[in-house]
């Protein structure tokens, strides 16, 4: 996927003017946050579950190597294979090799953000293997040659007309504007693909070290058909998804659906352990797990380690006013919203993604809904510090802050600046009480008036004895 | 409640926005603190809490400002300010120093003594003898740092509930950010604008004639937008209403209103 | 190569080399203990209340429930339901519970024991457990219970015994470990209602890729 994060500001400006996108984003705002709030209300232990989940994730990360090796040995014990992929390229090559070994022409895919992260589809296509996305949202995007703008609702940026148009173009059916009819169309089209595919690729929400199982969590059932019908099942996932036991997995499952869609539980929670067993009439004959690193192992032991707790529920973006205003594509890479603003700089470099951790008011809403209590604003601030230290912040910001800092550290000078500014702006406003155009503050006055200062500073008046 | 024997000595953290833009807010805070039986002093050595540097990633400048502020408020029983955001910043100081740095302990000590005004009145000294009246319907914007960092939600509402004639009409999404975000509003002006436009829309829909909040940054942003949109809704800091200091025109309002207001009273 | 680098990075981050026996012990004891974490109150009700909770939650998740007094009533109930829906074929799992039933009540409906295929209208399977806290069924694969039966047909009918309903997920895992000597079947399905998607404009539509209808035949045993 092409990196467009350096153009975040332009992307955002265009997104804000895109009437259709704004309409689509309205659906998000009215949906997920309300449903999550209802689900939380029905689970009195929710806050305690969040605490436990945070602590458990911290324990896992402190023992990550042990759990990963345990997981690997259990997968192997059950007749499966584990492949470790340091980079995106490693992951793509590994998967292509497996596809070639089994002579695969087409692969079906369940929804996987890690596969987006490593840009798997493009790689497979270039090398003669046709990937077919089977999640309804991902399928729509594939037809449109588009990318997900949200980690669990990939086509959230589209409206009914867009889907209707795409299906009409590719399905040779009469155009419909009934979502039920459109879904039925996709169902029929994909049935053939499920059966024809040589390989099925899914992600994994968790990898259970105790049993060597991977689990997918879906509402549609596409992931299950993807991993049951073809001869080979490949799981592409990342190293931080390992959990110790089934009991531990259950703790996260209780939080995941409620935080994500606001459901009590997702429709299908399916564990896969190795290939089909002797006597089984269906299920894959080969089972592979590709464990992707892609910069994650370097986060261990750093301030960013907390980010590895993420269970990809999307609550942070669902509640983020910035995401809600500009949508996921503005962020310019795979992971949008607050979690993306922390992860993306790690994966594509702060020099490419510096605008993302700055695109936050630090309102704290994301942290307040995160099921594993990731201090997202703190981590975004970490990147800003990193930028500042590396002299990557824009010059205007650096100079502005150091100039301001010079005064802020000197109370007498600061008084003088405040006094002069208050006087100047008060005069500029005249009787109107506000300023509609202020030099050097175009960012403010392009959109709103600047309320005028009263005139004299508090400190001056206080010194003069006013009470 | 403070008793006759004990008069809490409070250092006022003025906040740079109140100092420069709206001294009324600081005076109103002083009045409320005095009504609550505190003696109020204003340490000379204070400037800004350091948030612009902190949020721009400049840790060194932030640390310098933190040390200055910690020293300025040494010895006060309490440090109180009319902003959840600035007081919230004071609470972050402890994160700036290593565990073995002696400043860390001092920063933690400051954190334990620092309170936003409405939370100080309600949670710390249990004062609710508000003597004020306000003829109108207000709606309340919960500023982010106050709400999510300091847990300020019911405190201002409880105090506003004691104001004669005042009606409260809650808006939709009262807890959603107004888009100010300090330097955010100049770094990402068009996103900020969208967020504040959502806020003024919700404000209008509430039917209130006055928008009230506890942070001047947010209030300047929202008042500026309301005025640009030509709306008649006024914006005021919560302490102005609680202290009954309404002589000053509302935020961003013309002076002429002052006379109208005087006529009404 | 990759593995060594990844584990090396992690260990560097954790400030240690390969874990010593003592450093492994925290993880190993957790793996051995398989201890419960916090289980919500609603997962800890007495059994009769769990049954009620299961029913409520399953219905909320849009499953249909048919209550029966014994397994012998299953064929008639299935027959009536399929006839009402005008379905004339039933693909069935081949486990003893199902094969031992007297299916003559099906009449003109043909029951076949095989894996599911594209175009199948209805399937019937047994289940391993019901989980009350969210109205969830637990099924698993085996030589007599192919997984495709749970996903390909339009209608999935599942026999569930009240006696197998547990409160929380944790109890179902314990039951599963006990039944399989600690070894997991290839596929374990937790199913809560029929398939759905809200990928088009966030409007919920039932019947995406999996069954459009989930019928639970709840046996009062």
Image (spheres, helix red, strand yellow):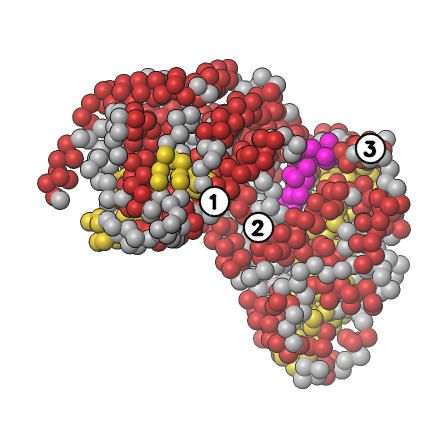
> Which of the labelled discs sits on residue B220, or is there none?
none
Residue A139 lies in what quarter of the image? top right
Residue C137 image offset from top left, x and y in percent: 68, 66
Identified at 73% across, 31% down, the residue is: A298
Q: Pointer 3: residues within 10 angstroms few (<14), some, or many (20+)?
A: some
Choose top left, top right, bottom left or bottom right for residue C165.
bottom right
| Between marks 1 and 3 in the image, the one whose residue lies nearer the viewer | 1
Which quadrant of the view contains residue A145?
top right
Task: Looking at the picture, tell me which residue is in the foreground, A161 or A80.
Answer: A80
Secondary structure category for the residue under label 3? helix
The nearer-to-camera label among 3 and 2 is 3
Is A306 magenta? The answer is: yes
> Residue B256: x, y in percent?
14, 32
What chain is tagged by disc 3? C
Within 10 Å of disc 1 (Cα), the crowding (few <14, some 14-19, many 20+) is some
The residue sitting at 38% across, 24% down in the picture is A443
Give the answer, above or below, for where A80 lies relative to A86: below
Q: Residue B150 — which label?
A: 1
Mark 1: secondary structure: loop
Q: Is residue C142 magenta?
A: no
Q: Residue at x 71, y 82 (%)?
A: C221
Residue linked to disc 3:
C8
Q: Is residue A156 above or below residue C182?
A: above
Pointer 2 residue: A260
Instruction: Give me the C-alpha separation between circle 2 and circle 1.
Output: 26 Å
Q: Quadrant of the C terminus of chain B?
A: top left
């Amino acid at each position: 996927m092409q990196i467009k994060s350096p153009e975040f500001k332009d992307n955002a400006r265009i997104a804000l003017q895109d009437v259709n996108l704004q309409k689509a984003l309205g659906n998000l705002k009215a949906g997920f946050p309300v449903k999550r709030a209802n689900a939380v209300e029905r689970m009195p232990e929710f806050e305690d579950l969040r605490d436990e989940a945070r602590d458990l994730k911290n324990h896992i990360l402190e023992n990550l190597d042990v759990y990963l090796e345990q997981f690997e040995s259990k997968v192997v014990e059950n007749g499966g294979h584990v492949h470790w992929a340091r980079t995106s390229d490693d992951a793509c090559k590994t998967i292509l090799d497996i596809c070639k070994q089994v002579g695969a022409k087409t692969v079906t895919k369940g929804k996987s953000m890690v596969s987006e992260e490593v840009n798997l589809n493009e790689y497979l296509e270039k090398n003669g293997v046709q990937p077919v996305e089977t999640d309804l949202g991902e399928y729509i995007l594939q037809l449109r040659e588009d990318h997900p703008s949200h980690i669990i609702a990939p086509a959230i940026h589209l409206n009914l007309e867009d889907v209707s148009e795409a299906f009409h173009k590719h399905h040779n059916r009469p155009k419909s504007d009934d979502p039920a009819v459109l879904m039925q169309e996709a169902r029929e089209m994909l049935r053939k693909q499920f059966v024809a595919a040589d390989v099925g690729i899914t992600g994994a929400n968790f990898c259970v070290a105790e049993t060597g199982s991977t689990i997918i969590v879906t509402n549609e059932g596409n992931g299950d058909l993807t991993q049951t019908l073809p001869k080979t099942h490949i799981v592409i996932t990342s190293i931080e998804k390992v959990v110790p036991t089934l009991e531990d997995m259950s703790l996260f499952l209780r939080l995941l659906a409620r935080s994500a869609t606001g459901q009590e539980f997702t429709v299908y929670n399916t564990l896969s352990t190795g290939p089909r067993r002797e006597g089984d009439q269906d299920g894959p004959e080969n089972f592979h797990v590709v464990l992707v690193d892609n910069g994650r192992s370097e986060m261990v032991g750093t301030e960013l380690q907390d980010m590895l707790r993420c269970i990809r529920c999307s609550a942070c973006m669902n509640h983020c006013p910035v995401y809600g205003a500009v949508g996921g594509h503005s962020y310019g890479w795979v992971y949008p919203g607050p979690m993306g603003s922390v992860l993306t700089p790690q994966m594509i470099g702060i020099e490419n993604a510096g605008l993302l951790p700055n695109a936050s008011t630090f309102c704290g809403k994301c942290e307040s809904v995160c099921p594993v209590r990731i201090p997202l604003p703190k981590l975004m601030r970490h990147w800003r510090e990193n930028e500042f230290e590396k002299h990557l912040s824009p010059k205007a910001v650096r100079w502005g802050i150091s100039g301001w800092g010079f005064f802020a550290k000197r109370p007498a000078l600061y008084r003088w600046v405040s006094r002069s500014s208050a006087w100047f702006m008060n005069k500029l406003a005249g009787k109107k009480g506000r300023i509609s155009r202020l030099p050097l503050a175009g960012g403010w006055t392009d959109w709103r008036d600047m309320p005028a200062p009263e005139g004299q500073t508090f400190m001056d008046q206080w010194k003069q004895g006013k009470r | 409640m403070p008793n006759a024997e004990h008069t809490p000595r409070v250092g006022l953290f003025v906040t740079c926005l109140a100092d420069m833009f709206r001294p009324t807010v600081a005076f109103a805070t002083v009045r409320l603190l005095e009504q609550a039986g505190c003696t109020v002093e204003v340490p000379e050595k204070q400037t800004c809490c350091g948030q612009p540097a902190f949020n721009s990633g400049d840790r060194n400048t932030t640390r310098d400002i933190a040390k200055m502020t910690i020293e300025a408020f040494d010895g006060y029983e309490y440090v109180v300010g009319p902003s959840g955001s600035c007081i919230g910043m004071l609470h972050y100081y402890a994160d700036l120093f290593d565990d073995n740095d002696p400043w860390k302990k001092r920063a933690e000590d400051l954190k334990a003594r620092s309170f936003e005004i409405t939370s100080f009145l309600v949670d710390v000294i249990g004062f609710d003898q508000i003597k004020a009246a306000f003829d109108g319907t207000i709606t309340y914007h919960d500023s982010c740092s106050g709400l999510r960092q300091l847990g300020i939600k019911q405190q201002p509402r409880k105090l506003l509930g004691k104001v004669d004639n005042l009606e409260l009409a809650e808006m939709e999404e009262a807890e959603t950010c107004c888009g100010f975000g300090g330097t955010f509003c100049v770094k990402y002006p068009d996103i900020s604008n969208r967020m504040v436009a959502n806020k003024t829309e919700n404000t209008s829909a509430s039917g209130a004639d006055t928008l009230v909040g506890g942070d001047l940054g947010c209030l300047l942003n929202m008042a500026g937008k309301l005025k640009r949109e030509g709306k008649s809704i006024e914006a005021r800091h919560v302490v102005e209403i609680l202290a009954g200091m309404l002589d000053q025109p509302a935020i961003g309002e013309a002076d002429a209103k002052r006379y109208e207001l005087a006529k009404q009273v | 190569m990759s593995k060594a680098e990844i584990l090396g990075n992690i260990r560097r981050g954790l400030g240690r080399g390969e874990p010593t026996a003592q450093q492994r012990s925290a993880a190993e004891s957790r793996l051995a203990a398989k201890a419960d974490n916090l289980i919500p109150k609603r997962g800890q009700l007495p059994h009769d209340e769990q049954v009620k909770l299961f029913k409520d939650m399953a219905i909320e998740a849009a499953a249909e429930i048919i209550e029966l007094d014994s397994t012998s009533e299953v064929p008639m109930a299935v027959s009536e339901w399929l006839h009402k829906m005008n379905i004339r074929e039933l693909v069935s799992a081949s486990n003893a519970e199902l094969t031992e039933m007297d299916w003559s009540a099906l009449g003109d409906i043909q029951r076949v024991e095989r894996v599911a295929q594209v175009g199948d209208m209805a399937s019937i399977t047994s289940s391993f457990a019901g989980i009350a806290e969210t109205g969830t069924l637990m099924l698993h694969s085996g030589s007599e219970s192919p997984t495709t039966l749970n996903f390909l047909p339009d209608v999935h009918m599942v026999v569930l015994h009240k006696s197998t309903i547990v409160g929380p997920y944790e109890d179902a895992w314990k039951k599963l470990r006990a039944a399989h000597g600690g070894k997991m079947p290839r596929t374990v399905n937790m199913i809560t209602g029929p398939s759905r998607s809200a990928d088009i404009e966030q409007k919920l539509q039932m019947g995406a890729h999996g069954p459009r209808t989930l019928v639970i035949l709840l046996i009062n045993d």
